[in-house]
Structure formats: C-alpha cells, structure tokens
Amino acid sequence: MAFCDLHVHSTASDGTDPPGMLGQLAKQAGLSAIALTDHDTTDGLPAAAESCREHGIAFVPGIELSVDPGPRVGQPDTALRSGTLHILGLFIDPDDAQLADIRVEVKKARGQRNPLIIAKLQQLGVSITYDDVLALADQQDTAIIGRPHIAQVLVNRGYAKNINDAFRKYIGQGAEAYVRRDPLPAARAIDAVHHAGGLAVLAHPIQLRYEDPDELEHFTAGLASLGLDAVEIHHSDHSERHCRQYQKLAEKLGLLISGGSDYHGTRKSIALGSENVPFEIYQTLRNTPPRFPRSTPHPPHPRRSPTFPPQA
Ligand code: AMP
Ligand code: MN
Ligand code: MN
Ligand code: MN
C-alpha cells in the first residue's frame, strides 16, 4: 500500500528539518506524497519541492493558517474564545497576491505579539530576551517566529523540561504569559486559499475542543458555507474514534477528507508518515477542482503539478 503525509512542518516555521531534507526523509519513511504546510509562510516550498522531485515524491505546496474560531457554538458571543482553528491550504500557488497579503499581516502581528510574550515572561521572573529568540530563529533560517521558538529558548535555559512543559507552565492558552494573537477571520483564510487555487482543509478538528458532536457539526457547517473543502480526519492528536467521527462529519457535510501527522521534526515526538494516510486521499484531493465561493470572482487556477514547480 502507498501512503502520504499531508501535514508537515519545516524550519521555515516551527519544524526542525530544513525543507530541502524533506524529500529524502519522506522516501525513508516510505511515503509517496507529502504536503509542506508551514505556519503562515510559503518560504520553504521551493526547496521542499526540489527535494521531493529528486527523490520521486509527489509534492503538495501548502500552508497552515491560524484563524479566529469566532464565538463558541452554544455560548454567548461574549464568552471567552477558546479552542484552536487552523486552516490548511493544499495545492496553493505560493505567489498568490491575496495569500501574500495575509502572510505580511500575520508576520506583522507576530512581530507585535512575541515581544509582549517576552515581557510577560520577564514579569514572571524569567530572564530571557527577544534577542535570544531571534538568535535561535536565525540559526534555523526561520521565516515565521512563534511560541514554539520561545518555548525552545525556555527549555534551553532550563525554565522548562521540554516544549510541552513550556507551553503548560508559561505560554499555552490559560498560562500566565499567554498572549492572544489578532486572528484572521475564517472567511478571509478560506477565500485566500481558493484565490491561490488551493483546497481549504479544517486541520485537527480535535483542537477546536468541541465535546458535543452536534456543536462541532454546527461549527463545521458554518465553515462549509464559507467554502471549506475538506476535513483532516487522520492526525496525530486524533484517536481512531475521533477519526471515524470526523469522517462521518465530512460525509454528512459533503466535504472531502485529508490526513497528516503534523510532523515538526524533533520539536514534537511525532514521526513523519506516522498516520499511515492512504495515498488515495492525496489522489482524490489532487483531482478535485477547488470550489469558488461566489464572493471570489476569478478564474480557477489549474491544479499544480505533483512535482511543483512544474519541470521545464
Ligand atoms: P503560535 O502560532 O506562535 O501561537 O504557536 C502555535 C504552535 O505551537 C502550534 O502550531 C504548535 O506547533 C505549538 N504548540 C501549541 N501548543 C503546544 C503544546 N502544548 N505543546 C507543544 N507545542 C505546542
Ligand atoms: Mn506548529
Ligand atoms: Mn495546527
Ligand atoms: Mn501543523
């Protein structure tokens, strides 16, 4: 059987493997296709595409966007927003202008948020500086600096046992140095992915933290009405029961399915390809034309070649 992994990070965001290594690693993991889906950046795509081409791995150019989950279903608008909404764009054109606007905005928002996190940490008596974080990011050729990099500095300086511990003790949701980022509306994220010719995928629905399946369905139906194309059913945070639940949800809402490990190199204990996602999932996504909401009047892009960028 052939497998794919459609959710992978590199050093361009918070993974620890350079994008140019991914082809070889995918080959070693026995994969036939991978998607590089770094947070809020497409900087790693050319090197990853080239490395996949060299190793005969089909490559999907992707991105992972952090999105405002909005008010919680079943709760008043004023309720504290919790849960994480990430939208994956798969088969995107990295040069798309609408996506580029979002990348610039997000980078600016992160540039404002990261020093606020550091200031809160310093108030808690943690003596690290933003320069420490920048130095780490620099070493790794990172385009997008986020909490994982801050967490790494906390670990390196002995303030936390490991990355998870750093999130739990300091910078995760609910911890004392947590700072919320100005989030992107879901409609904009989905539109931008479509504008770039891609498919918009609801990443790891478990992280939305809806206990009630009906509430999750209501929420996902809202995204579907904005043009969501698919649900990530295979993911390292999902049990088999979740996977089945999300598959049924996708079927019910007429959405496609996707899957990936959310590999981050050594920053998380998840192996590349560990979800054993059938290659057919990649093929179905690849062969399905993007949906265009009426609000985006532009001609569809052709689906990208599996060896993006196309060979001369
Ligand atoms: P940011 O985009 O800067 O808010 O950072 C979010 C990223 O941090 C996620 O994509 C995860 O890779 C990572 N992350 C979030 N929570 C945890 C956690 N509890 N343990 C380890 N990594 C986490
Ligand atoms: Mn991450
Ligand atoms: Mn995510
Ligand atoms: Mn991810």
Image (cartoon, rainbow, N blue to C red):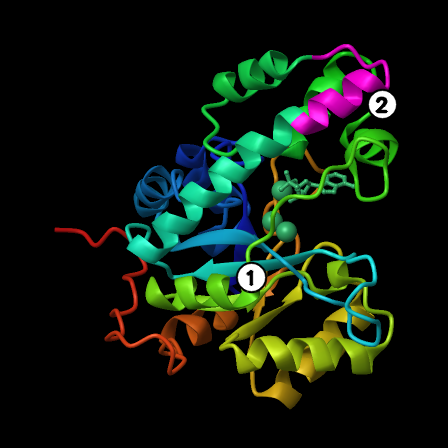
The crowding category of the residue bearing disc 1, from other C-alpha atoms within 10 Å (few below 14, some 14 to 19, many at least 20), is: few
Q: Residue, x 28% and y 50% (percent of image)?
A: 95
Q: Quadrant of residue 304?
A: bottom left
Q: Residue, x 61% and y 39% (percent of image)?
A: 264
Q: CA distance from mark 2 to mark 1?
A: 35 Å
Q: Would you say the magenta stretch is mainly helix, strand or loop? A: helix
The crowding category of the residue bearing disc 2, from other C-alpha atoms within 10 Å (few below 14, some 14 to 19, many at least 20), is: few
Q: Check disc 2 and report its element: helix, strand or loop.
A: loop
Q: How many marks?
A: 2
Q: In this image, 247 relative to 224: left or right?
A: right
Rendered image: mark on residue 161: 2
Q: Is residue 113 in view?
A: yes
Q: Is residue 96 above or below residue 119?
A: below
Going by the numbered disc 2, the residue's amino acid type is Lys
- Which residues lie in the magenta part? 116-128
Q: Quadrant of residue 218?
A: bottom right
Q: Quadrant of residue 155?
A: top right
Rendered image: mark on residue 185: 1
Measured as percent of width and height from the top left, residue 214 is found at: 80, 83
